[in-house]
Amino acid sequence: MCFNANGASQCKPMLTLQTQAIGEPFVVAPPNLQQVPITYPDCLSGAIDIPDSEEHPLWLNTFLVSVGLVVLVGLLVAFLLGMYRMRLQARDTSAAGNPSASVESGEPDFDPESDIGAQVVSKESGQSGSMHVTDMSDQDAVGPLTESALMSHLSPGGRWPMPPSRTISSLSSLQRPGVWVEKCCEITCRAAIMAELSRWKDCPDGHPELSFTRVERVIDLMRRADAGVLIVIAPRTSLNRLFFETTDSGYLTQRLHGVSVHSAEFEDVLMDFAAHTDTDCWPIDYHDPRARGLPKDGAILLSPEGYSLKGAAKVVGLPRAPCQWAGHGTRHETALAVAAYLDQAVVLVRSSNGHMHCLLARDRGSIALGLRLQGVMSSTATEHLPKA
């Protein structure tokens, strides 16, 4: 039944919702009725009271977020300041415990562009090349800059005093284990090279027996050279891993292209390339005008067939060699790095003083076989070079 506002019976269409599971009708009256009888199913007979959630005002939420950000930024600034203070303390401690003396000359280091004031640099009489520095920022206070005024600031030893706060310690050297230089007999040397070449048999251009004759030929030519030279013999697959630049704009590569190591032309070019000059360059009166004035530097890369793949090559981007070679320069350092980096290679290096060495890739640049100009080392002793 439906009733109007005056209590009179008035029938109007109603909407009845029927659920198959419960079977109880839902009666929904039009919106103009004040009281609507609703029948709930048994499953919804219990009332559940859900309290209304009280939300914080917007200004309070904004305030809390701002306070949190300020605290976070303050902690970050305090951390950075603490790290900066620790770094300053560590630097002051290191400067106080390390005297400012150069390793080689024993002279104090100085910074010529420091902002201490106008610095006066003088040479000590009797020791050419030794420079000393003092701070003359108070020049106006002591009077005009005269010789007597300068001498009054000298220490009893005749040296300019160095401000303790401007001392600079010398750079530390890299410490690595020394390479093992092995002096072996001819049989041992041949066996070691053959053991390395036998690892190339799976390569398309790797033939151990034929490659050994070319290695012997190169060793013989290097013995007769006049100055230092570096030659790397390796399969193409290994040489393709190297990155290099030519020091002579590709001159030596073009001249040795297609020339075998057994030919007289290769011997002549190698002897000219390894000949010592005052400028370490091709002579200006050399018979080939293309070579005049070009630098005679870099390595020669050979294939196992005995042909030059690159001449006067400066190998770049190599990882640091695991060992160091005391008493030698960049040519031997490059030889160590190449032997340690490549999987298959025979590296031959000759210094200007006549010492020759052979490094094999299987030793990873840790062992150098010593060779002499007249032949392979006859002694069977070994030596281990200490750290520099």
Image (cartoon, helix red, strand yellow):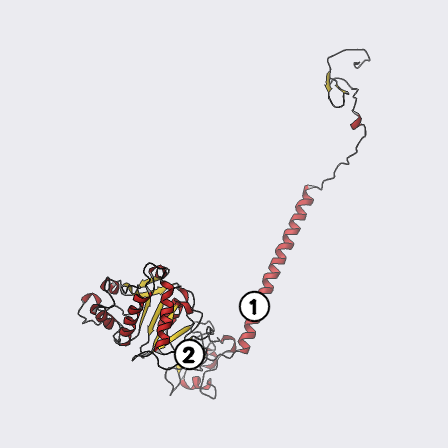
Is residue 326 in sight in this rendering?
no
Q: CA distance from mark 1 to mark 2?
A: 31 Å
Residue neighbourhood size for the residue with mark 1, other residues' Cα within 10 Å, grouped as few (<14), some (14–19), many (≥20): few
Specify the quadrant of the image occupied by residue 37: top right
Label 2: how many Cα within 10 Å (few below 14, some 14–19, many 20+):
some
- 62 is higher (above) or lower (below) than 197: above
Label 1 vs 2, first from the N-terminus: 1
Task: Please name the residue shown 68% across and 45% down the image.
Answer: 61
Query: What residue is rendered at 34% in x and 64% in y?
Result: 234
> Which circle, 1 or 2, is nearer the viewer?
1
Could you say whether the residue bearing mark 2 is in a helix, strand or loop?
Answer: strand
Q: Are marks 1 and 2 in contact (CB under 8 Å)?
A: no
Indicate the amino acid at tag 2: Val
Q: Is residue 94 above or below residue 206?
A: below
Where does label 2 land, which residue? 120
Q: Please, what is the three-letter code of the amino acid marked with disc 1?
A: Arg
